[in-house]
Amino acid sequence: MGAVTSLLYGAEDPSIAGMVLDSAFSNLYELMLELVDVYKIRVPKFTVKMAVHYMRRVIQRRAKFDIMDLNVVQFAPKTFIPALFGHASSDVFIQSHHTDRIHQAYAGDKNLIKFDGDHNSARPQFYYDSVSIFFYNVLNPPQFPSACSNKLEKYYNRGAGTNESLLYEIINGLRAAGTDAGSSSAAAASFTNATKSVVELLTERVNQLSVKNDSDLVS
């Protein structure tokens, strides 16, 4: 449901920088009927449809929304947020053709990655690398000073957590870089950002993009 929730929200909020959508279903009603076949539930099709319509009425009464509206393909042509789609090729819980249909109808910049495995399989490293590259491109995080970047690479090549002195050296280098850049307020802000946590950096970048999009709409 996370991917579908993101898609439905993204259709209403174009200020989002980017979305990674893993194993989305295109239509909830269609998915329900497929699961009956996948798990070989031995009941007539008409009883399944009756059960779905009963659930529909109960959910409408209690949650105030119609499950038949969960047809993501209808929202995809209205969504322009950059998106990376992912789906396991052997997923039998939500079959990959669901993502194919959404991807085909999607209006924004998009890419689709399929990988071996099923719905709950561990994702391969190349998929995580693709996600990292995608977020780097859409969020444009601040750059580390080159000297610190080289030390970071050396630190992780040795195995993160095995060389505390090198980690302290990296942190001190970032602080020194921020001090040296103190004569320029813009540069100082850039280096200060580099010492912040990943969560803080992502949050700041998303807020900046939101302000920019609001300004564009006003102008």
Image (cartoon, helix red, strand yellow):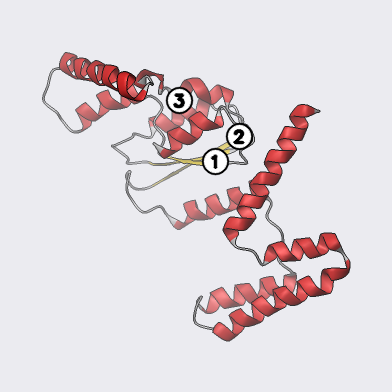
Q: Is residue 35 left or right of residue 7?
A: left
107 sits to left or right of 179: left
Residue at image position (56%, 54%) is 132
- The furthest residue to the left: 42
Badge 2 amino acid: Ile
Q: Residue at x 59, y 48 (%)?
A: 134
Q: Secondary structure at mark 2?
A: loop
Residue 54: percent from left, percent from top = 23, 17
Q: Please, what secondary structure does the residue beneath circle 3 have? A: helix
The circle on residue 86 is none
Residue 189 or residue 87, whichever sits in front: 189
159 vs 100, nearest the viewer = 159
Residue receiving disc 2: 81
Residue 148: x percent and y percent? 69, 73
The residue furthest right is 183
| Residue 75 visible in rendering | yes
Residue 71 appears left or right of 29:
right
Give the x, y percent position of residue 189: 77, 61
For the residues labelled 1 and 2, say whether their Cβ atoms are less than 8 Å apart. yes
Tell me which corner region of the image, top left, top right, bottom left or bottom right, holds residue 173: bottom right
Residue contact between numbered discs 3 and 1, judged by CB atoms under 8 Å? no
